[in-house]
Image (cartoon, grey):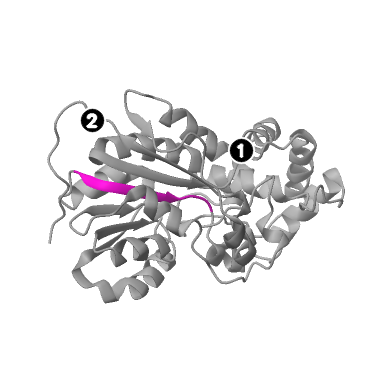
Amino acid sequence: MWAYTGETELENESPSVVHTTVLREETIAALEPRADGVYVDATLGMGGHAEALLEHGATVIGIDRDPSAIASASVRLAKFGQRVRVVQGSFGDIVSLLRSMGVEHVDGIVADLGISSAQLADGSRGMSFRLEGPLDMRMDPGGPMTALDLIRGLGQEELANVLFRYGEERKSRRIARCIKLALMDGRLSTTTDLRKAVVKAVGPARVGGVDPATRTFQALRIAVNHELDQLEQLVEGAHVLLAPGGVLAAISFHSLEDRILKRAMRDKTKWEPLTKKPVVAGVRELQQNPRARSAKLRSARAIVCTSSPQAKVLS
């Protein structure tokens, strides 16, 4: 998956670029998949990391809340037969999802965070300010709240706080005021409308090549999908699920995600980090896939004080 961030703007490039799995080899190296092991791709997306694990002979459980991603990945991974199980759901619910399948422990978990290129390229999802569409932004189209619902339900100050907290937007109050004014005037229903409101607040100038609406779109998407709360739950759930020595490998695309992972993996009672610093894409990958420039891979081995059964999955 790919995330557009305040530092590195995915949408400055074409939103229709074909998906390429980021840090694929580095992730597999961290997980060291065994042919008899059970692994979870907690953000299945187009199935790139799951495919890499399956090619090593592992059994994989794929989780994604986007039904279109589930459909696409299921087709891609069908050749692996019974060694792959796919389930729709949020990765924050990883413990309950796996236990409902009869799985108590697994050998490794990978999470590739953020928004996928397929979601970004679909104007009807409302993720992109380059493509006109409804103010939706839900990763699960069946979710209860769209971005427009969120804006309607928040006061101006609350909206400013969301933009500042999740988008690290320094001009959040000015932007929130213009967004609420556009809403009151009946001029806020599409992604284009939202971008116009932001531009009215801060001007059209790009900072370091980044569109002025970048941080606002990021903040609203994170809030709509509860992405940071989900990530906190994923890290906690991963430690519950991982068999002794099992590895969590997570790829983040902006500082808010990376901060959560860094803080969690510093807990020496639960985790043994596999590297001192996050792994980033090498020169070759960056040449082939410039979108990988903001990706950071953190991985850690679970420290389990009590003995746990080996990983297992229902047949």
Residue 313 percent across, percent down from the top left: 16, 54
Q: Nearer the viewer, residue 120 or 146?
A: 120
Q: Quadrant of residue 266?
A: top left
Residue 204 versus residue 92 in the image, above or below: below
Q: Nearer the viewer, residue 146 or 92?
A: 92
Residue at which label 1 appears = 166
Q: Amino acid at mark 2?
A: Val
Pointer 1: residues within 10 angstroms few (<14), some, or many (20+)? many
From the image, which quarter does the C terminus lie in?
A: bottom left
**x 37%, y 65%: residue:** 70
Pointer 2: residues within 10 angstroms few (<14), some, or many (20+)? some
**x 42%, y 64%: residue:** 48
Q: Is residue 223 left or right of residue 56?
A: right
| Residue 127 visible | no
Q: Is residue 248 left or right of residue 120?
A: left
Element on which disc 1 rests:
helix
Q: Nearer the viewer, residue 6 or 280?
A: 280
- Residue 110 lies in the magenta-colored region: yes
Residue interval drawn in magenta: 105-114
Q: Amino acid at mark 1?
A: Tyr
Residue 183 percent across, percent down from the top left: 72, 48
Q: Could you tell which of marks 2 and 1 lies nearer the N-terminus?
A: 1
Query: Alpha-carbon distance for marks 2 and 1?
Result: 33 Å
Residue at which label 2 appears = 304
Q: Main secondary structure of the magenta part?
A: strand
